[in-house]
Amino acid sequence: MELVKNNFKRGLARGELQIGLWCSLCSNIAVELLGHSGFDWLVLDTEHSPNEVPDILAQLQAMGTGTASAVVRPAWNDTVLIKRYLDIGSQTVLLPYVQNAEEAARAVAATRYPPRGVRGVTGSGRAARYGRVGDYLNRADEEICVLVQAETRTALDNIEAIAGVEGVDGVFIGPSDMAASLGHIGQPGHPVVQAALKEAVDRLKKVGKPAGILTANEDEARRYVDWGYLFVAVGSDIGLLTKNADALATKFRR
């Protein structure tokens, strides 16, 4: 049986714009629905939502027939967490709060089997189609995509070194945490923060590394695409539900 192809990783490598959505509802039904909406990728978040490994497994299974690739965000850059999500079939992981090249290298190592890394070995998990991909242990790296989050001034200062770590496929700029780090918490649209976001993508383009970002503001999203961000999340499942539910209720409220 063949190794599952990672369309998201291949799209990044080709320099293709990929539009995504953040998912925090912890619902396999919601991601199944959204997976058929035409997005290129969906983030299954476990850092700021109460998702656990069984929840993510159900969501990965639900996304199996849609257009969107799954990007799983572990709660931390932790070897054990990363291993568990890879074993259940996550091929792209988004690791929060990477501050320097050493932390980026640790993230990559957690996704690689020895001697290239420290990932614990099993050939019978869902990632290997329950043992049916005979050469999975030797070929897994081909389809694993490592995204690291640069979310502070410190990370921005180190961004070329982070991006230059072998095995890092893309760098995601966290606008909310960046705003907080720069002294403008809750104001990702502040001119100082926007200048930092522009600086980040410009520097990443110079070293040939794809940049990603999240915003629920359409004008901001289009600006980020114009700046050269390649994987852009343009909203969230919670945001879509809240906005549209509130609007519908308002229409009929006295």
Image (spheres, grey):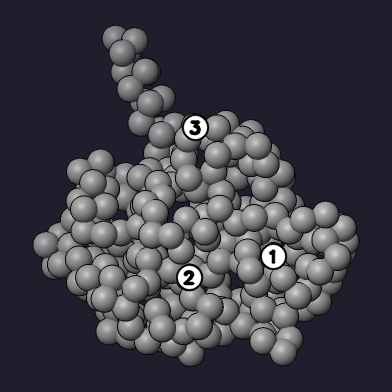
- State yes or no: discs 1 and 3 in contact (Cβ < 8 Å): no
Instruction: Tell me the SS state at disc 3.
Output: loop
Q: Is residue 47 above or below residue 203?
A: above
Instruction: Tell me the SS state at disc 1.
Output: helix
Tag in front: 2 or 1:
2
Q: Is residue 134 above or below residue 106?
A: above
Q: CA distance from mark 1 to mark 3?
A: 25 Å
Q: Residue at x 27, y 84 (%)?
A: 157
List x then y, in percent, for residue 193.
Answer: 19, 65
Q: CA distance from mark 2 to mark 1?
A: 16 Å
Amino acid bearing label 3:
Ser
**Would residue 242 be found to the left or right of residue 226 on screen?**
right
- Give the tally of numbered discs: 3
Tag in front: 2 or 3:
2
Q: Which residue is mark 3?
A: 37
| Quadrant (top left, top right, bottom left, bottom right) of the C terminus | top left
Q: Crowding near pointer 3: few (<14 within 10 Å), some, many (20+)? A: few
Q: Quadrant of residue 77?
A: bottom right
- Sequence-wise, the earlier of marks 2 and 3 is 3
Q: Which residue is farthest left?
A: 191
Amino acid bearing label 1:
Leu
List x then y, in percent, for residue 34.
Answer: 53, 35
Q: Which residue is mark 1?
A: 86
- Residue 24, visible in the rendered structure: no
List x then y, in percent, for residue 7.
Answer: 56, 53
**Would residue 176 be found to the left or right of residue 109 on screen?**
left
Q: Which residue is mark 2?
A: 169
Q: Residue at x 56, y 49 (%)?
A: 69
| Quadrant (top left, top right, bottom left, bottom right) of the N terminus | bottom right
